[in-house]
Amino acid sequence: MMVGVDVGEARRERRAAHTPVRLAVRDLDLPSEDPHGTDLRAVSLEVCRGEILGVAGVAGNGQEELFAVLSGERRAPRPGAVLLDGDPIGHEDINARRRRGAAFVPEERLGHAAAPRFSLSENALVAGHAANGFVRAGFVMRDRMLTWVDSVTGAFDVRKGPRDPEARALSGGNLQKFVVGREILRRPSLIIVSQPTWGVDAGAAALIRKALIGLAEEGSSVVVISQDLDELIEISDRLAVIFHGRLSAARPVEALTREAIGLLMGGADSPAEAAAAPREEVA
């Protein structure tokens, strides 16, 4: 009633992942740049084509550091620590990874995902100049940028006044829809999203979750880092938990109970120990 529409459930049809691995992280150690941050320790993961991998955890357990190294904002200690379609990309920056077909949505939408005083088209240029065709022969294609903004705002129901307002003029939920939408509409082969529905209403959350599911069904690999356990259970194929900078082995969502996930989030030594918790349906 508050959002004015019926909000449908964004349910992911469960399936086993037998497709080739698109993203792999191999035994990654990374010290945090923040004195109050969390070092990553021996992190390993694999994400297959067409799969949604959820990463759960209490805030402050290494999520920011994990996003930074997956996106290229931080370089891995060695190139082979991060692999994309089998190619070592650990030393490549974010623009090089975007040119390979990757997309990224950080947790902080205003100030990290979008510059507050830049217009939406300028923000689209900053995020997409390496892969969206907004620059040709050294010239910025402003008409193409504005058309792209129109496409994103139309597809993701971004409510705004003028055609191309400053990012700070949008409400938090509308800016989040724009930030997520500008990445999804690129149809990336890989997308890393941190807190995709943080602070948005139920209608916007359902729209974003359905878009991520639709992207995976088209063959893209999706990594969702979220503190919202219900969200992860709803859309993920497999789920891993990060605790004190260590990532648990990813397991099919159907094989985990809420109690098991809670134990992993609290520091259980292994998925096997957590799986021994009493069974409860996650649906």
Image (cartoon, rainbow, N blue to C red):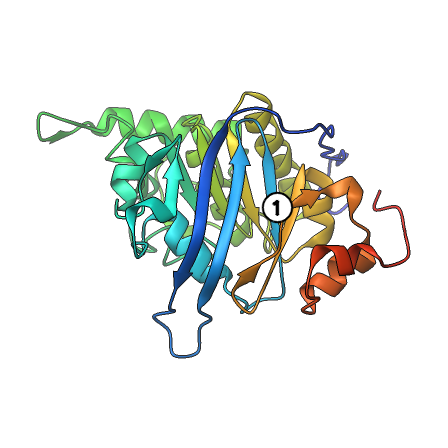
Residue 128 % position (x, y): 30, 36
Q: Is residue 226 left or right of residue 104?
A: right
Residue 35, placed above or below residue 109: below
Residue 125 seen in the current view: no
**Number of other residues with Cα within 10 Å of mark 1, as a class: few under 14, some 14 to 19, many 20 or more:** many
Q: Residue at x 44, y 73 (%)?
A: 37
Closer-to-camera residue (178/99): 99
Q: Is residue 121 left or right of residue 46?
A: left
Q: Is residue 103 left or right of residue 231?
A: left
Q: Residue at x 74, y 42 (%)?
A: 253
Residue 216 seen in the current view: yes
In the figure, residue 143 lies in which quadrant? top left
Closer-to-camera residue (91/213): 91
Residue 26 % position (x, y): 44, 48
- Tell me which amino acid carries mark 1: Gly
Can you name the residue that lies furthest to the left here?
137
Closer-to-camera residue (66/82): 82
Can you name the residue that lies furthest to the bottom here?
35
Q: Residue at x 36, y 30 (%)?
A: 101
Q: In which quadrant will I find the C terminus?
A: top right
Residue designated by label 1: 54
Q: Residue at x 67, y 36 (%)?
A: 237
Residue 155 % position (x, y): 52, 27
Closer-to-camera residue (13/78): 78
Q: In which quadrant will I find the N terminus?
A: top right
Q: How many marks?
A: 1
Residue 232 % position (x, y): 68, 46
Q: Secondary structure at mark 1?
A: strand
